[in-house]
Amino acid sequence: MLSHPLYRKSPVWLQEWLIAIRESIRKIMREDNEFRQLLADAELRQYWTFDQLQAFQEKELGSLLNRAAITVPHYQQLLSQNSSVALEPLKKLTQLPLLTKRDIKANPAAFIASDMPKGPRFSISTSGTTGSPLTLFQTLNSIKRETAFARRQMHWAGYKEGDKLAWIRGDMIVPVADQNPPFWRFNRSANSLMMSSYHLSEKNVSAYLEALREFNPVLIQAYPSSISYLANWLLNNGQQANLSALKGIMTSSETLTNVQREQIETSFGVQVFDWYGSVERVAAIGTCEYGRYHIIEDYSYLELGSSSDDTAEIIGTGFNNALMPLIRYATGDSVELETSGTQCDCKRAFRLVKTIIGRMDDTIKTPDGRAIGRLDHIYKGVFDINEAQIVQETLNTIEIRVVPARNGGLPETTKQQLKLNLQARIGLDMDIHIVKVASLPRTKNGKLLAVISKIK
């Protein structure tokens, strides 16, 4: 809806009503009695003992594996009736090979369960941090389950239903070409202030802070790059946020560094609650009230393959997407393991990790002083790409280096779509060049940097 011409051409007051209508429809669909029961169950499980959680996981795994062997084509081949049937769920699981994004992209239909009743199915795409997005499918029940876990995490941060919420993320609620505030819209249905993450600049930062102070939210949900921009400005100008109602800040979708956490907590005077999740719905890790990272054990079964440097790759088997179950999915992300062996003071039996090690992208600097992070949205709906990388060599120029999916090259329509998608987020003041390359360099640990900026 936010990209629809009707919304774009409407005055602010009408845009806010359109947003509220959309939110009301979503609430009716998502937050019914089924959702409330899912949330209530999740609230109870968080204080289960380790043995209770382990029994829950084994039950979920057993049910998932048995069903996948019958109804999911990909696993019918791997979990044939003549092998591994008598094994315990955990042993049966470890006999399966790791699943990768490449496996799913090669044949997405092979992962769709055949026993699901007729009803609405929703597509959801990974952001495609390296230009290789993945489209998955889920039911409304899966969305409700995901929402229940997210809401429980919000409760950890002090949020209660109906509280004021501010949102500083990647929604295109205001065209980048708009140069004057408001760079936000009020969603009266959710009692939330939706703020553009694309207009943050030295020129506009005071207006953002003034709007936040006037709204005075209980919780702010934001990309780390967005909220740390405000935090740095406050620190550099000797100011505090002065949000009297604020109880917590919840970050997600990007890797939160220790420096960013310290800056945000100093400037805003509240704790940061970080959340790690994925569109694949195979793993979740969240910060509790005592500032420690917990593996959300009732969300999925998470395997941590330890290495010599106390890090481990996140390999997950999700419990919440019955339509398209993913088993032993290798996320490519990793964590630093908690080695102290202590239990958290929050009394939850969820395992602890020390640090989440994910993407460490640069931000793009624009000529008008903005710093734009989380640009992987530009690859949504774009095909013919194996992978890509955004590189900023000068303040006025950007290259998108693309490895085409086909030997024939990169279609002109793909180039134009990439350019338009990026311009929608950074504006029209920079020269954008799409460059075809045979391969992209990796870091010493084999990772591809999604964004590289030489402007510091």
Image: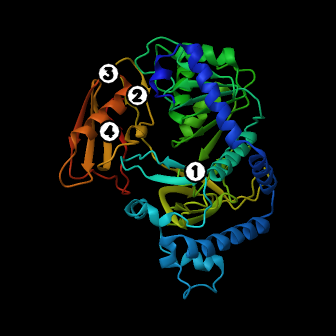
Looking at the image, tell me whether mark 4 or mark 2 is earlier in sequence order. Answer: 4
For disc 4, the marked residue is 390
> Based on the displayed image, in which of its 4 quarters is residue 295 positioned?
bottom right
Q: Which residue is mark 2?
A: 425
Q: Residue furthest left?
A: 408
Residue 226 sits above or below residue 205 on the image: below
Please tell me which of labels 3 and 1 falls first in the chain: 1
Q: Amino acid at mark 4?
A: Ile
**Position of residue 262 measured from the top left corner of the image (x, y, whole percent):** 60, 34
Q: Earlier in the sequence, mark 2 or mark 1?
A: 1
Secondary structure beneath dot 2 equals helix
Q: Nearer the viewer, mark 1 or mark 4?
A: 4
Instruction: Return the residue at label 3.
Output: 428
Q: Amino acid at mark 2?
A: Arg
Question: In front: mark 3 or mark 1?
Answer: 3
Which amino acid, mark 1? Thr
Where in the figure is residue 284, as x and y percent of width and height?
61, 53
Left or right? Give the position of 219 relative to 312. Answer: right
- Residue contact between numbered discs 1 and 4, judged by CB atoms under 8 Å: no
Q: For this view, does 423 lie left or right of residue 139?
A: left
Q: Which badge, 1 or 4, comes first in the chain's sequence?
A: 1
In space, the residues marked 1 and 4 are separated at their CA atoms by 26 Å
For mark 1, what is the residue?
355
